[in-house]
Image (tube, coloured by chain):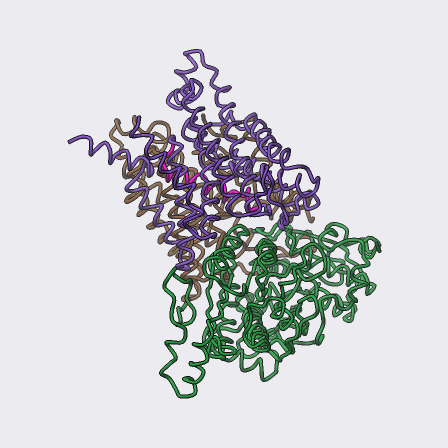
């Protein structure tokens, strides 16, 4: 147990000390990584623990983001209400999607989530009077929770706190009896059904949880950027999250978080070095698949397993 | 993209190049400049433009135009070296913002320049305003409201390229003079499309014309068959704004369905008759009108020199992007020179930007008090010259500002913004409704 | 009269969609691979076709060279990469996503970023009069070619040895293997045919949709919609799905111009909500 605690304590120290070590720009970049880590972890709840890959997860990210943006900008609602409302709207979106999509399986599930998300995107893109259309909504203010989060560092600590709490909550969910039942369903739906589990209800709850956490990530991302744009809920964003989860290693929570951080960093770093960043990113994906088909966490586990086996 | 001495794609942290070390041994006169250049630190310009994806050609042309001007002045102004750091905006607003932050906070650039996508410009705008960093929009980003007093106005922003509405006003004026009063319009279904076609509708209504039909294909539309088939053939002419490959695809189908002999075409902003598309359209393109703030066929010494130099480097004719990039770079350099290179003083620098006046490949350049360029509008028509197709200017509206032919007060007196007129353009009463 | 033209527009687009979707559907049916590079095959096909036409002036040659080249690309991907992850959905997704990026960037590098429309073959660059309107013969050609390809594929599936193997493989790959069918060869053949058809769609669609950065992603989404609406693994589904999506898109844009962004995805969501495995798909 002490061996396990040590890396977490170290990680906590690093996260707290970071703004004192690196320049502002990197604090912003790490904030973005953390937000996407939460987004990827929420999707992993679907892929890794329910076995249903979604290509529409950005819809919830965007619903959370648009809600905080609209409430703050047009209704001048306090952030104490706007942020929870963002999570709530994303949750309700999850409920609606789940009702429509959960009958489908495998690739059909992937595609119906994509279709539903494209509809949400179309509304965000087309309903100019509400959403500002493709211009999006600029001028959204950073919130004040006891202290103003306008400052880069303050906002960073806020994100560290919320993403940390969310990660703990997600871990508790997947380790609870409910989470174990989800894993059972992923392995064999029929067996779990025979054991008397209500498979649909379990999947439904997992889907809604995933949507809620994605909504929180989206709301944080909008606060970070101070604007919201339909690009935040485009299929490209959903696909990016899917790649983060697979690259990191499905069903591990930590893996997708690492995958998210890595991809955000690589996109930023490589695109500053060369115009051919897309090519290099593509090669990295292919090579990762070849050498780590279970993701980075899978690679690490294989490594540990090999070392412990003399 | 070539990596010159002065133009690095991006700076590696810590690996600062000592300014001017490269030029030091070339000539005595340069040595004098050299001494001056070493005295002052370089001016770093963060150039944000797309170099990947579908907008890459616009971005690269704009970057090249800027480089061509900086090469003319040896990457030096008022005794300070100029360093250009290019970042890929990827046509994604969140990425554009991150890139702007990287340029300002890590690379310590003094000026942001470029920007093709309006969404990216909107995302960067507030950041530049907060950080008081000059933002010179010198590529395509044309959202009208960035240079009009209002919530988006930014005292540290200037635009030397073009906004959305002025080419539309020129198109409406020209079509009315031709006697085409009833116009069917098509515009891509996004903010830039509404801005452009709304500006056209407002100008047309004011001049006594009428829009008979509006169609808005999605920006990613593949097949223009339905829109061409549905086109109002009783109109006097068609006006359109379909960027990307949309204009190209539309014109092809339009010609094939036999409509070119029935309806004259006005291509606002010259998106379908964009120079690289002309050989693909071939004879289908002959006779198509377009409005833009540039044509490679402008017969002035400034443009002939520029177009020749551009052709030698790329083996094709410039579109508006390269001269836009060139003008942005020159406006920056002239302003920096006027304040003795002290670009860190943002307020003085922006004032100096607004005071620049010079001749360019696009024609005479000046800026209004809102920071928007005042320049000439050209109506062009595609002609076949030898084996090449050329956008030959057939009418010029010299030195027009962003509200032309209205005054700012009249522009402000209307109730609806252009982007809100989608679906109502056939109703001139609403279009011209006062506040 | 105008309705005849609208219908022809929708059917010709639908036939193009069928060509793009048929390969995707076959590949999925046999190997359960959701190939994210399918749109890239379209794009590379269109680009290679444009180069062939530019150099030789022959559309017919482009129709042969481009699909064959892309079929080779498909075979290479299947043999050297996808094969290692048979029936392993997630690594396949990451792999094909990586190839989507790689191919997109290589295309941008080689062919530049400006949109390209392929010139039409001289024989079909004219228009005929339909009730006072002109209609391009090329679009009629698309309809004929689409039905011809559908016929050939049907014959191939129902009356050839490989077709029988394919049907057995789609039903149950393990049993097929046990019966002595060379499943490995079958996989490669089907992948080659799928890539071939997508590239054929690229050349044939070149004069209408053309090639440009991002077209790979757009076409991939369209092809996915078609196969999902029709039902994965079903040729009949791909044909019906293609026609349905083509017509819905066309008439949707005319009747409900406000909802042009939704003409494809709303019907798909509705169909899947009621039939979770598409119109002709099996669970």
What percent of the width, then of the height, locates residue A291?
28, 42
Q: Is residue B114 left or right of residue C30?
A: right
- Is A183 on the left-hand or right-hand side of B90? left
Name the residue furthest bottom: B28
The correct choice, above or below, for B64 with respect to A156 in the image is below
Q: Which residues are magenta?
A: A231-250
Residue B378 visible in the snapshot: no
Q: Position of residue B180 (x, y in %)?
A: 77, 66
Q: Residue furthest left?
A: A310
In the rendered image, the vertical position of residue B360 relative to residue B61, given as above or below: below
The colour with which the image depicts chain A is purple
Residue situated in front as seen by the camera: A260 or C3: A260
Q: In the rendering, at what x and y percent does residue A251 appear?
A: 38, 30
Against B411, is A146 above or below? above
What color does chain B have in the rendering?
green
Image quarter (top left, top right, bottom left or bottom right) of the C terminus of chain C: top left
Secondary structure that dominates the magenta span: helix
Residue C281, relative to residue B344: is it above or below? above
Q: Give the residue displayed 50% in from the left and 43% down from the top.
A: A156
One can see residue C227 in this view:
yes
Say which quarter of the image contains residue C59: bottom left
- Identify the hue of chain C: brown
- Left or right of B185? Residue A291 is left
Whether residue A242 appears in magenta in the rendering, the answer is yes
Residue at image position (42%, 81%) is B35
Q: How many marks?
A: 0
Q: Quadrant of residue B302?
A: bottom right
Q: Position of residue A261 (x, y in %)?
A: 41, 43
Residue A232 in magenta stretch: yes
Towards the viewer: C66 or A249: A249
Foreground pick, B142 / B350: B350
């Amino acid at each position: 147990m002490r061996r396990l605690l040590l890396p977490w304590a170290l990680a906590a120290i690093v996260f707290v000390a970071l703004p004192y070590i690196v320049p502002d720009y990197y604090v912003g970049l790490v904030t973005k990584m953390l937000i996407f880590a939460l987004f990827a972890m929420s999707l992993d709840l679907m892929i890794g623990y329910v076995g249903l890959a979604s290509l529409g997860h950005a819809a919830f990210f965007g619903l959370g983001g648009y809600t905080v943006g609209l409430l703050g900008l047009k209704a001048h609602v306090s952030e104490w209400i706007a942020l929870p409302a963002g999570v709530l709207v994303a949750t309700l979106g999850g409920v609606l999607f789940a009702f429509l999509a959960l009958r489908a399986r495998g690739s059909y599930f992937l595609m119906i989530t994509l279709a539903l998300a494209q509809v949400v995107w179309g509304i965000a893109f087309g309903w100019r009077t509400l959403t500002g259309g493709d211009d999006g909504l600029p001028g959204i203010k950073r919130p004040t929770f006891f202290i103003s989060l306008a400052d880069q560092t303050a906002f960073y600590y806020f994100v560290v706190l919320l993403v940390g709490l969310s990660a703990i909550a997600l871990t508790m969910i997947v380790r609870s009896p409910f989470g174990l039942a989800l894993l059972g369903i992923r392995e064999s739906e029929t067996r779990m059904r025979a054991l008397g589990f209500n498979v649909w209800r379990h999947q439904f709850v997992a889907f809604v949880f995933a949507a809620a956490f994605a909504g929180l990530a989206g709301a944080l991302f909008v606060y970070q950027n101070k604007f919201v744009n339909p690009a935040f809920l485009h299929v490209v964003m959903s696909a990016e999250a899917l790649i983060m989860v697979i690259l990191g290693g499905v069903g591990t929570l930590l893996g997708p978080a690492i995958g998210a951080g890595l991809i955000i960093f690589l996109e930023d770093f490589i695109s500053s070095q060369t115009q051919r960043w897309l090519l290099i990113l593509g090669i990295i994906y292919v090579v990762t698949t070849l050498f780590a088909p279970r993701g980075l966490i899978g690679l690490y586990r294989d490594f540990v397993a090999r070392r412990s086996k003399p | 993209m070539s990596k010159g001495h002065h133009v690095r794609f991006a700076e590696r942290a810590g690996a600062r190049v000592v300014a001017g070390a490269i030029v030091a041994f070339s000539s005595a006169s340069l040595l004098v400049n050299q001494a001056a250049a070493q005295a002052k630190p370089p001016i770093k310009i963060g150039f944000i433009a797309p170099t990947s994806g579908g907008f890459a050609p616009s971005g690269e042309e704009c970057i090249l135009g800027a480089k061509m001007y900086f090469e003319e002045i040896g990457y030096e102004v008022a005794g300070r070296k100029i360093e250009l750091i290019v970042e890929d905006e990827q046509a994604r607003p969140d990425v554009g913002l991150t890139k702007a932050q990287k340029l300002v906070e890590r690379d310590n650039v003094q000026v942001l320049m470029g920007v093709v996508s309006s969404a990216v410009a909107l995302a960067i705008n507030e950041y530049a305003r907060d950080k008081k960093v000059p933002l010179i929009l010198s590529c395509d980003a044309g959202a009208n409201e960035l240079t009009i007093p209002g919530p988006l106005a930014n005292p540290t922003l200037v635009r030397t390229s073009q906004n959305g509405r002025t080419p539309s006003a020129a198109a409406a004026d020209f079509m009315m003079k031709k006697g085409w009063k009833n116009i069917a319009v098509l515009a891509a279904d996004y903010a830039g499309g509404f801005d452009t076609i709304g500006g056209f509708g407002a100008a047309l209504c004011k001049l006594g014309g009428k829009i008979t039909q509006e169609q808005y294909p999605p920006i990613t539309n593949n097949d223009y068959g339905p829109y061409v088939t549905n086109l109002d053939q009783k109109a006097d002419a068609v006006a359109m704004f379909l960027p990307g490959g949309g204009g190209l695809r539309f014109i092809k189908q339009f010609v094939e369905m036999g409509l070119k002999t029935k309806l004259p075409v006005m291509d606002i902003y010259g998106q379908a008759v964009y120079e690289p598309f002309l050989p693909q359209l071939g004879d289908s393109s002959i006779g198509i009108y377009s409005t833009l703030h540039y044509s490679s066929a402008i017969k002035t010494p400034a443009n002939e020199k520029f177009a020749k130099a551009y052709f030698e480097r790329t083996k094709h004719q410039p579109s508006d992007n390269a001269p836009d990039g060139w003008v942005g770079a020159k406006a920056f350099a002239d302003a920096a020179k006027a304040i003795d290179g002290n670009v860190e003083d943002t307020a003085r620098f922006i004032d100096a930007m607004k005071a620049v006046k010079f001749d360019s490949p696009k024609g005479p350049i000046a800026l209004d008090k809102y920071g928007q360029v005042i320049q000439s509008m050209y109506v062009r028509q595609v002609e076949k010259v030898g084996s090449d197709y050329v956008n030959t200017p057939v009418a010029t509206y010299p030195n027009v500002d962003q509200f032309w032919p209205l005054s700012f007060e009249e522009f402000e007196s209307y109730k609806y913004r252009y982007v809100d007129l989608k679906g109502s353009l056939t109703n001139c009463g609403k279009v011209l409704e006062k506040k | 009269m105008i309705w005849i033209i609208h219908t022809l527009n929708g059917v010709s687009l639908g036939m193009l969609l069928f060509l793009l979707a048929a390969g995707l559907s076959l590949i999925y049916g046999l190997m359960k691979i959701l190939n994210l590079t399918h749109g890239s095959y379209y794009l590379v096909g269109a680009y290679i076709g444009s180069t062939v036409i530019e150099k030789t002036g022959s559309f017919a040659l482009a129709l042969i060279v481009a699909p064959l080249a892309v079929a080779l690309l498909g075979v290479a991907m299947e043999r050297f990469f996808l094969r290692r992850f048979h029936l392993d959905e997630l690594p396949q997704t990451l792999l094909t996503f990586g190839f989507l990026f790689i191919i997109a960037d290589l295309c941008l590098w080689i062919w530049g970023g400006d949109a390209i429309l392929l010139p039409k073959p001289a024989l079909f660059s004219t228009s005929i009069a339909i009730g006072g309107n002109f209609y391009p013969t090329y679009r009629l050609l698309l309809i004929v070619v689409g039905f011809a390809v559908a016929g050939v594929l049907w014959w191939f599936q129902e009356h050839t040895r490989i077709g029988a193997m394919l049907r057995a493989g789609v039903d149950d790959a393990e049993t097929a293997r046990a019966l002595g069918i060379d499943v490995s060869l079958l996989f490669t053949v089907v992948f080659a045919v799928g890539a071939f058809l997508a590239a054929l769609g690229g050349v044939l669609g070149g004069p209408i949709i053309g090639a440009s950065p991002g077209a790979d992603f757009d076409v991939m989404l369209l092809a996915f919609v078609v196969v999902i609406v029709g039902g994965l693994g079903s040729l009949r589904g791909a044909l019906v799905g293609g026609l349905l999506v083509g017509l819905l898109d066309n008439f949707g844009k005319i009747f409900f111009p406000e909802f042009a962004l939704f003409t494809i995805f709303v019907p798909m969501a509705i169909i899947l909500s009621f039939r979770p495995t598409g119109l002709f798909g099996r669970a």
